[in-house]
Amino acid sequence: MLRTVGIDIGSTTSHAMFARLRLQRLADSLSSRYVVVEREVLHRSPIVLTPYSAGNTIDAAALEAHIAGWYATAGLAREDVDTGAVILTGAALERENARELADLFAGEGGKFVCATAGHALEATLAAHGSGSVARSRRDHETILHVDVGGGTTKLARIEDGVIVATTAIGVGARSRAAGRDPAERKRIAGELADAIVAATRGATVPGTLQLLATLPRAAAPGRITVSGGVSEYLAGRERADYDDLGRELAEAIEARRGELQAPLEVVAEGIRATVIGASQFTVQVSGSTIGVGAALPLRNVPVVQLGTAVHGSGPIALAVKWNGEPDHARIRALAERIAAATDRRPLIVATDGDIAATLGAILRDELRFKGDLVTLDGLELGDLDYIDVGSRWPSGRTRSGRGRAGREGFAPPRSSSSRGTRGT
């Protein structure tokens, strides 16, 4: 069991969720990796307006006071939290002190809470937290998930439980809202809703609103699910005004249901979908056969695939795909490739197979590998990921994880690892 937190600092609102996760091996074999199989919500914070001070600056002190109150109400101290993420979403990414906020709240959040950002990652978290990924997997259905927030709208296409494409546009409840009369607000909301409909079809939206590459043209999804702050108006759960276009944008989207390629459904979690995704999908746990020959923790280590050119200096993590039987000759050949790949130290080798202990032993004992080395198994890592490695659990496993880098991002600063992103 792990206790986890997700903290969402958005352009309009901020909130948090605390949960307990149960991890389980994918199969009966002890060599299979761990996955999250159950989440129990411990506490949902109230949703508060993101506080601002002068100009374009988020009020860090006021926000920190809110977060401290959420921990206290949840009955948790910072050291009680095992994993999680602080995410800055939408226009909050562009605030002058965004990076400092992310690093501060991640550093104070718990043992290995990371700071994350990036439109593609937000789309992924919302798709998971909304339940759309699980539903797609369960029903073998293609779902397009749309998260409409204050500053941006993120989309994720999900096929049989796998997110195959994401995109984002600069459209949200706070778009061009200030100083408008009711008729003008309605007109602008209609234009924004048109852009969202276009994005669901894979079309490019006008001007600078296209934040990521468009979705590839593909067959119509079976359904379109919606989350985010605007979805609360669509569901009738929110009636208050926040000096933005949330209400008008929801009405405009509702009026365009017939233009969508599939039935539109508002998910139950609504505004909380992204923070739920952050609290649930933030950790991977390495298997039982690891090799540690370096001082821990190791933080913010960039990941590259074995076979990719490795430049620069400092720690590096090689991601290795493994298929087939773990016979000595094959592992020895892999070890030779690793030894020749880079002289950067410390070196982390993370495989998705159950060979870490043998691989580390061959590197050390047979190839006389020099320098700090950590070998981990049961992890799926990719290019542009960053990894933290922290203390081992009493059973000998090492907590470890990764996060896909977004267009903007921050480094996970904590010890035991969690998914976190950093700009490239």
Image: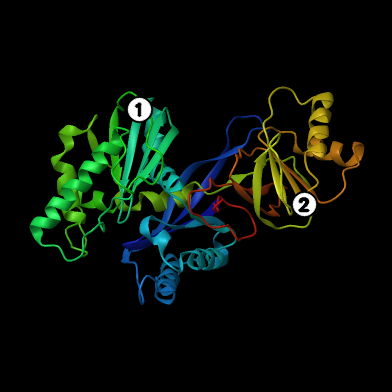
Which amino acid does the dot numbered 1 rest on? Arg
Q: Residue furthest front?
A: 207
Tell me where residue 377 sits by quadrant: top right
Q: Residue 166 in the image: state x and y as whole percent.
A: 41, 39
Numbered tag placed on residue 346 in the rendering: 2
Q: Does residue 108 sit above or below 370 in this rendering?
A: below
Earlier sequence position, callout 2 versus callout 1: 1
Q: Residue 277 in the image: state x and y as whole percent.
A: 43, 48
Q: Residue 240 in the image: state x and y as whole percent.
A: 18, 62
Out of 37 and 181, give the one closest to the viewer: 181
* Residue at image mark 1: 217
Q: Residues within 10 Å of mark 2 (few under 14, many from 20)?
A: many
Which amino acid does the dot numbered 2 rest on? Pro
Tell me where residue 216 sits by quadrant: top left
Question: Which residue corresponds to the image point at 24% horizontal and 38% vertical from the top-left?
Answer: 197
Question: Which residue corresponds to the image point at 14% horizontal and 56% vertical from the top-left?
Answer: 185
Q: Nearer the viewer, mark 2 or mark 1?
A: 1
